[in-house]
Image (cartoon, rainbow, N blue to C red):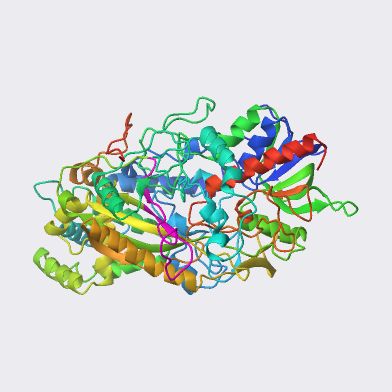
């Protein structure tokens, strides 16, 4: 083994240990950014009597992973830029700002809402608990009505 | 060159003269291989792409949350958008930062499963006017991912010129092709409901899929208007096929609309399991994937085709294959490209011309009030939802445009509801509305005939070449006035039908999508009786080179408004029957 390879291996191990030391640490966002994203996603799709919301469906973690893997640098930085005004605010202030952005159909609001909706409605909670989707099963007879 | 289902096959023998060499392995090429091998003829089937086992890669039942990217393609892949086709110049993948660029179909969901089935635009550029060209270079071609609506044409299409004076008639009538539609139905399986419509003939149907409540209600309303909503006529076997061990019947399992298409149990027809594997089992088929054909070779003395020249798509090494007949089935545009590259069969000057297809875009969406907030029903997993047959310019009064259109539609609850993206606002009320309206939505999108016009054409770009050094196509193709008028009517008539059924319309758009969107390109080597105005005869033999056949959609005289795959296969069966007969009599 080359020395360089050994070094890579060691760095790899170190990185693994770091991840292990901080379970659930965001992959791209800072902790305050991630907390703001988590709050905003739950404001868009909150828990209600019917089903859990975006927080329980780990919407922020899915968005964080997607942004971390994004191929174009601007797809990362635009998220950071969009979130930045929310980071220093408290919950009530965040809701006020989100309402303002929604009212003027702000592009960041659109993106946040679309990403939240997608992440939620492709999650176990979204598909099975909220929508209570009945498909993706073997049907001996198709469900529905005959054309007569 | 071995493929997985040919375990004991040695390297392809190119020293012998095959009865036929078939170029392309999709609906047309697979059918040519099936018909000719079943008659004992020796066939070499060449496919530019690899063999890929869709049983293993489509994962039709995988839940999005069980996939690391919820089924989406890798981050360094990019799918072209309608804006990119519209506002950028072709070749669209030039100057892109992404590692792989694919056509717009890879912008849908579940695209990680289809990422190897659709070509990389960087390797396969083209130039000219706006065109969204979807290509699949893989054994089976686009049949691996097709939408599977399987319709027949009628004499309203074959003899359309007699009805409205436009264009040319086909050199055949419905009665010529009817027995072959029957053969295709029985051999491949088709699901549907009999309607007895002269302009949309019934197939020999297996069990139809069922309708949702909203669809049944719309069907009943349309009956009162003299229009027909019928369960999707799907190229899907719902009762199984005793003669084909490679295909299962449909069990309505996968969320079939989630992915780009395809079926991992092959209930939906695909060429590899429906045609090629059975052809292989006759012992008469030799399949060579990774074979990019770039020329049809011709004997200068006799003027007959002698075979083809091709490159190994991976090693780029050049080979020749010899055959008594050459059958082009590379797709409408690729077969035209091959004729142009070979500079043959074009004494008419019509190769690449009369290019036509279906126009898409106009659509209507709404919801059924009675269904809002109702308990969930199982609406997904069927072979398809519904089809509304053509009703304009039939026997009654004529509209201000020529020809017709039909609608494909769907309704009910999907895994990821469209209401999640269309419902305004956010918060508790938004969340509840998404859920309550998810099962109440119904949507239709039109497919209309684009008139075949000589000036709509492709030719070879004098400069641009693909990754294999082969000159590429240059498009000179645009929708015209007739399509624009038709688009307006599609949206207006759709709204009218929804309103008659008391469906609350939330969107009615007459905007046309870019040319090419329907993936139904047709007509670049049309058939006819007159060698001066057509490229092939009624048996798809080139007027100029009798042992050269073109058996794909390029031979269609007009696009009609019905999806072309079933007609491509029926015509190909008919032509190959005729060819086998001629070969046996030594007449080719």
Query: A59 left or right of B583?
Result: left
Single out the residue that lies furthest toward the front: B396
Number of marks in picture: 0
Q: Is residue B94 above or below residue B223?
A: below
What residue appears at the point 20 percent right and 64 percent down from the top-left corner?
Answer: B424
Residue B373 lies, in percent from the top left, at: 14, 49
Residue B397 lies, in percent from the top left, at: 41, 64
Q: Is residue B7 visible?
A: no
Residue A9 lies, in percent from the top left, at: 46, 45
User: Can you tell which quarter of the image residue B65 is in?
Assistant: top left
Q: Is residue A49 magenta?
A: no
Q: Is residue B385 magenta?
A: yes
Specify the segment rendered in magenta: B383-408
User: Can you tell which quarter of the image residue B42 is in?
Assistant: top right
Q: Is residue B206 above or below residue B430?
A: above
Tell me the quadrant of the picture where the C terminus of chain B can be found.
top right
Residue A86 lies, in percent from the top left, at: 19, 68
Dominant secondary-structure state across the stretch colored magenta: loop
Front residue of this view, candidates B5 and A31: B5
What residue appears at the point 20 percent right and 72 percent down from the top-left corner?
Answer: A101
Tell me the quadrant of the picture where the N terminus of chain B can be found.
top right
Q: Is residue B372 visible?
A: yes
Query: B462 left or right of B302?
Result: left
Front residue of this view, candidates B108 and B504: B504
């Amino acid at each position: 083994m080359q020395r360089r390879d050994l070094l890579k291996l060691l760095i790899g191990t170190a990185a693994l240990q770091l991840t292990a030391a901080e379970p659930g640490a965001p992959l791209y966002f800072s902790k305050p950014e991630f907390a703001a994203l988590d709050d905003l996603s739950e404001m868009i799709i909150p828990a209600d009597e019917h089903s859990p919301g975006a927080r329980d469906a780990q919407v922020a973690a899915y968005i964080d992973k997607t942004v971390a893997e994004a191929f174009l640098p601007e797809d990362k930085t635009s998220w950071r830029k969009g979130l930045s005004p929310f980071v220093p605010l408290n919950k009530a202030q965040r809701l006020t700002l989100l309402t303002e952005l929604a009212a003027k159909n702000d592009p960041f609001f659109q993106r946040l809402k679309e990403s939240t909706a997608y992440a939620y409605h492709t999650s176990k909670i979204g598909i099975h608990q909220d929508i209570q989707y009945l498909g993706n099963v073997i049907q001996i007879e198709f469900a529905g009505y005959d054309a007569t | 060159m071995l493929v997985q289902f040919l375990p004991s096959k040695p390297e392809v023998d190119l020293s012998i003269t095959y009865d036929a060499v078939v170029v392309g392995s999709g609906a047309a090429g697979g059918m040519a291989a099936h018909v000719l091998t079943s008659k004992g003829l020796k066939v070499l089937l060449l496919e530019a792409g690899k063999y890929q086992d869709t049983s293993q890669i489509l994962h039709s039942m995988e839940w999005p949350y069980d996939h690391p990217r919820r089924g989406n393609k890798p981050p360094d892949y990019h799918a072209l958008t309608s804006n990119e086709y519209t506002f950028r110049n072709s070749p669209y993948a030039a100057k892109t930062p992404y590692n792989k660029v694919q056509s717009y179909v890879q912008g849908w969901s579940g695209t990680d499963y289809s990422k190897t089935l659709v070509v990389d635009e960087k390797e396969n550029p083209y130039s000219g006017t706006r065109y969204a060209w979807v290509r699949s270079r893989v054994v089976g071609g686009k049949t691996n991912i097709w939408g599977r609506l399987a319709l027949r044409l009628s004499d309203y299409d074959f003899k359309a010129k007699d009805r409205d004076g436009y264009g040319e008639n086909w050199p055949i009538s419905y009665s010529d092709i009817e027995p072959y539609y029957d053969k295709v139905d029985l051999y491949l399986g088709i699901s549907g409901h009999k309607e007895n419509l002269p302009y949309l003939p019934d197939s020999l149907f297996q069990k139809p899929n069922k309708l949702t409540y909203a669809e049944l209600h719309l069907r009943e309303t349309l009956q009162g208007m003299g229009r027909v909503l019928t369960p999707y006529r799907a190229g899907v076997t719902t009762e199984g096929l005793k003669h084909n061990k490679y295909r299962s019947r449909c069990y309505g399992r996968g969320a079939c609309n989630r992915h780009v298409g395809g079926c991992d149990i092959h209930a939906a027809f695909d060429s590899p399991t429906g045609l090629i594997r059975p052809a292989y089992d006759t012992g008469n088929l030799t399949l060579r994937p990774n074979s990019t054909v770039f020329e049809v070779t011709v004997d200068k003395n006799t003027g007959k085709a002698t075979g083809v020249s091709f490159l190994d798509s991976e090693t780029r090494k050049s080979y020749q294959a010899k055959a008594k007949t050459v059958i082009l089935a590379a797709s409408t545009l690729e077969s035209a490209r091959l004729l142009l590259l070979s500079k043959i069969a074009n004494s008419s000057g019509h190769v690449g011309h009369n290019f036509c297809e279906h126009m898409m875009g106009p659509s209507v969406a709404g919801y059924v009030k009675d269904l809002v907030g109702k308990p969930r029903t199982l609406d997904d997993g069927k072979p398809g939802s519904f089809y509304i047959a053509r009703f304009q310019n039939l026997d009654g009064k004529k509209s201000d445009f020529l020809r017709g259109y039909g609608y494909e539609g769907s309704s009910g609850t999907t895994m990821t509801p469209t209401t999640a993206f269309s419902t305004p606002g956010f918060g508790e009320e938004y969340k509840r509305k998404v859920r309550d309206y998810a099962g109440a939505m119904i949507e239709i999108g039109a497919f209309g005939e684009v008139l075949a016009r000589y000036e709509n054409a492709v030719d070879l770009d004098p400069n641009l070449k693909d990754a294999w050094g082969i000159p590429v196509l240059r498009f000179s193709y645009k929708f015209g006035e007739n399509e624009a008028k038709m688009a307006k009517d599609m949206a207006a008539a759709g709204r009218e039908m929804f309103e008659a059924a008391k469906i609350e319309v939330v969107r009615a758009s007459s905007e046309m999508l870019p040319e090419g969107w329907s993936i139904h390109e047709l007509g670049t080597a049309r058939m006819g009786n007159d060698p001066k105005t057509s490229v092939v005869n009624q048996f798809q033999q080139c007027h100029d080179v009798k042992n050269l056949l073109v058996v794909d959609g390029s031979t269609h005289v007009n696009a009609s408004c019905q999806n072309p795959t079933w007609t491509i296969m029926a015509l190909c069966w008919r032509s190959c029957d005729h060819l086998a007969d001629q070969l046996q009599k030594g007449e080719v």
